[in-house]
Amino acid sequence: MQTEKVLGIDIGGSGIKAAPVNTKNGLMLESRHRIPTPSPATPDNVAGIIGDLVKHFNWEGLIGCGFPAVIQQGMAKTAANVDKSWIGTDINKLFSEATGLPTYVVNDADAAGTAEMKFGAGKGKNGMVFLCTVGTGIGTVIFNNGGLVPNLELGHIEYKGMDAEAYVSDATRKAENLSWEEWAGRFSEYLDAIEKLIWPDLIILGGGASKKGDKFLHYLSVNTPVVPAELLNNAGIVGAALAGRDQYKLAKATKKTRKKMK
Ligand code: BGC
């Protein structure tokens, strides 16, 4: 199986977006295609959409997906903003069967972060980089000297007696009709709490917020430099493709080692 061109799929609360990606340079090979997330967004319904996306691109190769939950060895372990029936679902298996193609799933923030570090605002950045995606949920990821720590869920730290995500997400900003200044005040407090926990050298903001930096970046008062993500909407797709490639290679290497040990 060739690993240079991979179909990247970004599964979100409102839309499922995909495009074939050249994993060597991070460029999309065709314009992205978006299908609204089905309701209810159960595993079987979403698997149907993944099948439709594969048909749309006449895809016959490797697939990588970003999914908004903790993912261990292809299995969803949490479901903060998705249907609870995902917990315990082997997504690698479900999507591979639905498409007939090898499909690997990772956490969506891990995917977007990987793309930003390789081709965007984190390129060449060493030290501790904290990347936060602000959308329906809060996705968090840290890279230490470029190395990813997977499934970091700092969007769910307890803050002011509640789940931090419920206080600072973009969904909350909209639901509570907060002005940018009000929301940025909350978000700044959140980043302040994060700073005290992990002491990053750089903070990159991704997700929907990365496009609206001019509206709120000047209100943030954290000590660490904060920059918007550069790949904007495409980080999730590009990162999913990179993750698909890496997970596939890892699975192949593990199989080889096991064979040798027998
Ligand atoms: C989930 C994370 C996800 C983030 C962004 C959070 O609610 O717990 O796993 O990365 O939303 O989608």
Image: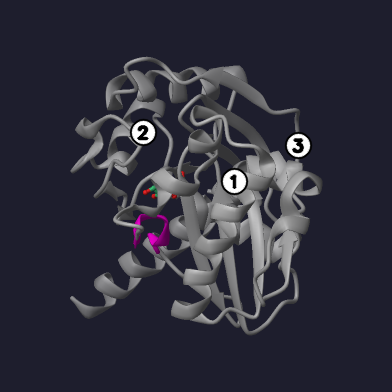
Q: Secondary structure at mark 1?
A: helix
Which of pointers 1 and 2 indicates the residue nearer the eye? 1
Q: Residues within 10 Å of mark 2 (few under 14, many from 20)?
A: many
Q: Is residue 69 left or right of residue 124?
A: left
Question: Which residue is located at x 68 percent, y 46 percent?
Answer: 181
Residue 67 occupies quadrant = top left
Q: Secondary structure at mark 2?
A: helix
Q: Is residue 182 left or right of residue 41?
A: right
Residue type at the position of mark 2: Phe
Image mark for residue 95: 2
Q: Quadrant of the C terminus?
A: bottom left
* Residue 224 picture location, percent across and down: 67, 76
Residue 115 appears in the figure: yes
Image mark for residue 183: 1
Image mark for residue 197: none
Residue placed most toward the observer, 222 or 179: 179
Residue type at the position of mark 1: Trp
Report the number of discs: 3
Question: Which residue is located at x 28 percent, y 77 percent?
Answer: 260
Residue 235 appears in the figure: no
What range is drawn magenta here?
152-158
* Residue 26 picture location, percent across and down: 73, 52
